Amino acid sequence: MAIRPIEVFYWVQDVWEYFRVSQKRKELRQPGAGVDYTDERFRNYVKQIVARYHPKEMKLKVVEIIEETPSTKTFRFERVDGPLPPFRAGQYVNLFVDVDGVLTSRPYSISSSPKDENLDLTVQQKPGGFVTRYLHKELQVGDAFKSTGPKGHFYHEPLIDGKDLVFLAGGSGITPFMSMIRTMLQEDHELRIDLLYGSRLPYDVIFDEELSKLAEEHSNLNYSLVISEPPDSYSGLCGFLDAELIRTQVGEVEGKTFYICGPNVMYDFCMKALNELGVPTHKIRREVYGPPEEVTQEAGWPEHLSGEEIFEVNVEGHKSIKAMSGEPLMNSLERHEIVIRAVCRSGECSACRIRLLSGKVFMPSHTALRESDKSFGYIHACVAYPLEDLKIRI
């Protein structure tokens, strides 16, 4: 991969600053003298370094659009306000978009390798999807966006996870695994990867050709495609990623670390299968995957509510808005031009926490709400669903 001039510039700048500070330290290191590292010049330098390698926001430009399947496209971005920061294969960015005047965002796993000079986001269009429809129908090469820096904890930790890995992917949940596989096969030939990839239809399998080729070229990658709705002529593996299929394809589970990423309905199904196989909880890693597609099917949802009820939400210091019970509160706020900070939009990161002053909301069981937040009435707006009229404080 060619080194860009801007990267050389930043490197030289960092080395020069290192030598400048080192020389200053020598001058100040006299008996009885010390260095005040709280000095403004040190604080500013540290802030610059942190911002460069862990940016809160990035400016991105679309440089290529690749059609992967009839329902899926890869959008290739370059960063225009600096070099891409380092990230771990498996992480995501939250992409900010303006769709018909509604400012919103969506988290997308990075499908490219950290070694690449561009950033790939592979997006599958969902039926009725608000943002995915916009990306697929409206996005063009040259369009500019803002995103967060790389986020998330869904990546391989060698000391904890070991070298025998099983990836359970469903649909567009293949994207973080694609980044991992591309990276791991380049770096560590001792890893053993079993990929079980569930897809509804054989013609809509994302990265199928590349995965098949990688499996042929690398003996440490075993790729098993599983089709849930096969046509009559299909002769490959069929069904779901249940305990029997996992046992058949993977063999003994002892010593293996399992990773799960796919539609929300897949998690309970796969967790049940792994429990049946005796996989300990600490050997299971799972990626958050947005709010439920159908929240009324979640455990604990009030039976008397259909998800179509409309409630009034009084936003203290702003205005009152209408919100539907079956839609995340954050989406309703954005539709009424009230934008709050968002990163994961899956109930994990707590960036969107707001205070519930009155009323009740439903949040799925996987929501990572702190005990202190529960005590003081804070909720995660990205996965909070109004069950009655509310009053909130942002």
Image (spheres, rainbow, N blue to C red):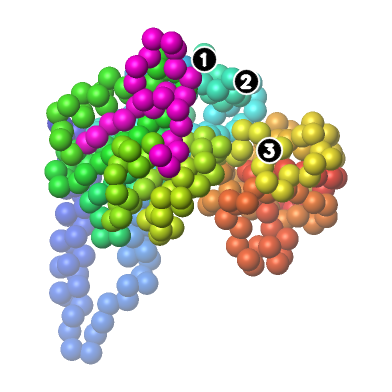
Q: Do the residues labelled 2 and 1 touch (CB within 8 Å)?
A: no
Determine the CA span between mark 2 and mark 1.
Answer: 15 Å
Image location of residue 123, percent across then percent down: 45, 25
Seen from this angle, which residue lies furthest top?
A: 233
- Identify the residue under disc 1: 138
Q: Which residue is drawn at 17% across and 26% down?
A: 216
- The mark closer to the camera, 2 or 3, is 3
Secondary structure, mark 2, is loop
Determine the CA span between mark 2 and mark 3.
Answer: 18 Å
Q: Which mark is residue 128?
A: 2
Image location of residue 361, percent across then percent down: 75, 49
Rendered view: 144 above or below 282 = above
| First in residue order: circle 3 vs circle 1 | 1
| First in residue order: circle 2 vs circle 1 | 2
- The mark closer to the camera, 3 or 1, is 3
- Figure quadrant of the N terminus: top left
In this rendering, position of residue 210 left or right of residue 371: left
Residue 29 colored magenta? no
Rendered view: 132 above or below 160 = above
- Identify the residue under disc 3: 297
Q: Residue at x 18, y 80 (%)?
A: 29
Identify which amino acid the numbered label 2 is placed on.
Answer: Gly
